[in-house]
Image (cartoon, rainbow, N blue to C red):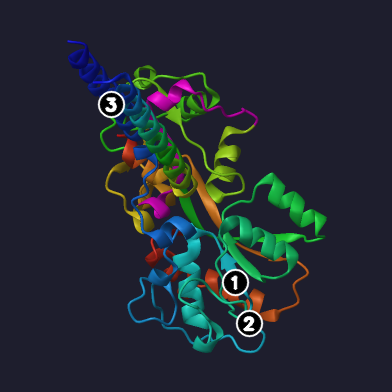
Amino acid sequence: MSDKTFYRLLTAIAVIGAVSLLALLLRTAVLFRDCSILSYIANRG
Amino acid sequence: MKTVRRVVLLIGFAALVLAADLFFYNFVTARYINHTSKAMQAKSIELDKYLPFTENSGIVRAETGVTLTGDLPVVDGAAALYPVYSAFVNALYPEESVEFDGENFTENSAMRYTNTRGAYKAVADGTADLVFCVSPSKEQLAYAKEQGAELEFVPIGKEAFVFLVHKNNPVDSLTCDEVRDIYAGRITRWSQVGGSGGYIDALQRNEGSGSQSAMRNFMGDIPMKRTLIGYTGRPIGFSFRYYVEGIVENGDIKMLALDGVYPNRENIASGAYPLSNELYAVYRKDNQNPNVKKMVDWILSPEGQKIVEESGYVPIR
């Protein structure tokens, strides 16, 4: 595996990781706005 | 050999990224997923389930010889009281006085729903004649005073203010002092009150909601804290009994006994349960609409009190 390919793959994984985490953060913010105290307790166990 | 090392490194890095996402989802995102419907999330209650003059409505229906005519009081109220004031409207108002557009009540409707915060504002502003709520917050009273509104609070029923945990939490009962110590941050772990599961996550509601105001009354001058470490543990929250049992009906949560007394209707009626709150019909003392007093008198009559009782609350008389 060439250096170029290795670093491209490494960058791609890092970007996918960052984007997916950002998406999760946004999704969480939307859920946080609407979540009721009762649902929160039911989810936490 | 170098290629093998790099492939292993890439797979390891990808696994690390995936693990971070999964951890975040399970530890943070998953706890906010709301299992009620979209309508419920937005409004605290599904309005169309308890509409007046609707065949499949969940409200109590009562025969009465009283019908309001002329200047109909505009009524509004809290989510926990929506089914009962909808039943009052159903019994007393002509059908054409209520307009519902499928999402909410229209501006021309004599029945509205804006929940506790909106209802107290509306009665103070004079855009609603009669609202059905629990006790107001200090801010809501101050706002009414600013508007020059002196409010009359007429108790029409009683309801328990309850504390909630997950059904798997081994704790079934707390004392009032323990609850105050939990919310003051003096008790931080479930093991201190006979339970397990690490730290206590003491949840609160938004300011101005009926249950948050009731919680502030319960705490008195003691300030409430929610610790960051509590986020790792099991939660405790609060609400009103009928909202939990009669409206939301979430099978994964349970109500706690307080000072050894469970919040059922018998214990609320007898006064054995220590945290019974009065439910009020609230109107401006300077309201000139004669139908306001007529409606309140009817709610306090045996016919009105029967609706309160059959709707699942504890009547005042």
Determine whether, in the image, residue B64 is placed left or right of residue B198: right
According to the picture, the residue beneath numbered tag 2 turns out to be B72
Q: Which mark is residue B14?
A: 3
According to the picture, the residue beneath numbered tag 1 turns out to be B75
Which chain does the residue under circle 2 lie in?
Answer: B
Amino acid type at mark 2: Leu
Front position among marks 2 and 3: 3
Q: Which mark is residue B211?
A: none
Amino acid type at mark 1: Val
Q: Residue at x 65, y 59 (%)?
A: B120
- Magenta highlight on residue B5: no
Q: Is residue B251 above or below residue B105?
A: above
Of residues B55 and B62, the one drawn nearer to the viewer in this rendering: B55
The percent position of residue B228, horizontal first and vertical second, equals 49, 23
- Magenta highlight on residue B234: yes
Of callouts 1 and 3, the N-terminal one: 3
Determine whether, in the image, residue B66 is placed left or right of residue A41: right
